[in-house]
């Protein structure tokens, strides 16, 4: 059987891994190939894909197998739509890139595949319990802060913790009942926020950075951010984009690069009934799903290649 191999490097982050594997899955199904994927685990990234989501769309293989096959079947890069006929006819195709795959026109987006995934049972339970106990029925702002030492320098420079603190203070002063769900990779930052800003919610016992426990906690954060009505996020973060994709790219996202609104409208995009399906929203807190595209169109123009929207 013909196959398609998606290769991830040992230092690839969650966002890069997901868009490569899921984009390759779409192409493999289109070309009737078996999907194989390289997903290294170790000190740089602990969990397997199947530790995080119920994923049965492909089979994991080792880096050594892919590299050995590369002698006969060289790696392709992200532009798969432009692949010549001879490459498309190979018994084995291999993809190695950190970028979003450019697939032939008319194929399903990897973002749709991502939204359709169901988290692993322990992660799903933690999402539901936290949402039900602390966030359900509340208007809340999702806040994603990157403060860990390994965070990208451009992210930390453009989006320091001080910017989040000041912006949360502003929102809390103007809209005192607003709750905040904070996703942060440094626990001391969350402790400091709770000491000075009311209604701050965050996971505890998150595990060490990029360990199995740490990444599982990050997935819980991801779904809770995506279930919010508005997001404050860091500039230059693929994790923020993942939350946006889970939400169907419909919640307003504000970064330090934007001029903030005086009042944050938390209800314009509807309410989430199931935090594992945050793209499905209702017009009222306990109601059924409706079409947000028709009910509350986004008047802000999108720039090609960007998902962060000016609020």
Image (cartoon, grey):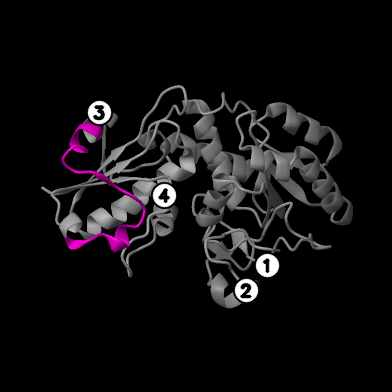
The residue at which mark 4 appears reads as 19
Q: Where residue 94 appears, x then y in whole percent?
A: 25, 45
Task: Find numbered disc 2 in the image and state the secondary structure of the residue it sits on.
Answer: loop
Mark 1 Cα-neighbour bin, 10 Å: few <14, some 14–19, many ≥20:
some
Q: Is residue 216 above or below residue 176?
A: above
The residue at which mark 1 appears reads as 268
Q: Where residue 1 appears, x then y in whole percent?
A: 10, 47
Residue at 55% across / 61% down in the picture?
A: 249
Mark whose residue sits in front, 1 or 4? 4
Task: Find numbered disc 4 in the image and state the secondary structure of the residue it sits on.
Answer: helix
Mark 4 Cα-neighbour bin, 10 Å: few <14, some 14–19, many ≥20:
many
Q: Earlier in the sequence, mark 3 or mark 1?
A: 3
Q: Which residues are magenta?
A: 67-85
Magenta stretch encompasses residue 248:
no
The residue at which mark 3 appears reads as 64
Residue 221 relative to residue 99: left or right: right
State the CA–CA distance, disc 3 to disc 2: 50 Å
Q: Nearer the viewer, residue 124 or 93?
A: 93
Task: Find numbered disc 3 in the image and state the secondary structure of the residue it sits on.
Answer: helix
């Amino acid at each position: 059987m013909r196959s398609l191999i998606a290769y991830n490097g040992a230092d690839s982050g969650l966002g890069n891994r997901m868009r490569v594997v899921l984009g390759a899955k779409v192409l493999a199904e289109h070309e009737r190939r078996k999907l194989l994927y390289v997903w290294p685990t170790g000190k740089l990234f602990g969990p397997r894909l199947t530790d995080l989501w119920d994923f049965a769309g492909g089979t994991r293989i080792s880096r050594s197998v892919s590299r050995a096959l590369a002698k006969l079947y060289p790696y392709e890069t992200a532009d798969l739509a432009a692949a010549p006929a001879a490459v498309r006819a190979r018994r084995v195709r291999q993809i190695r890139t950190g970028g979003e795959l450019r697939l032939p026109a008319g194929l399903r987006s990897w973002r749709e595949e991502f939204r359709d995934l169901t988290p692993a049972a322990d992660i799903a339970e933690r999402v539901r319990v936290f949402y039900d106990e602390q966030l359900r029925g509340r208007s809340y702002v999702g806040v994603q802060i990157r403060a860990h030492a390994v965070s990208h320098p451009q992210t930390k420079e453009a989006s320091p913790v001080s910017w989040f603190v000041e912006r949360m203070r502003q929102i809390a002063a103007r809209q005192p009942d607003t709750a905040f769900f904070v996703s942060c990779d440094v626990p001391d930052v969350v402790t400091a926020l709770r000491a000075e800003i009311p209604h701050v919610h965050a996971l505890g016992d998150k595990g060490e950075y990029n360990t199995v426990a740490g990444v599982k906690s990050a997935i819980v954060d991801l779904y809770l951010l995506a279930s919010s009505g508005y997001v404050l996020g860091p500039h230059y973060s693929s994790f923020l984009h993942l939350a946006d994709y889970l939400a169907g790219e419909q919640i307003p996202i504000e970064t330090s690069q934007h001029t903030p609104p005086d009042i944050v409208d938390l209800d314009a995009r509807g309410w989430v009934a199931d935090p594992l399906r945050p793209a499905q929203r209702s017009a009222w807190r306990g109601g059924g799903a409706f079409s947000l595209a028709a009910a509350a169109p986004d008047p802000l123009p999108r720039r090609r290649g960007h998902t962060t929207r000016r609020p």
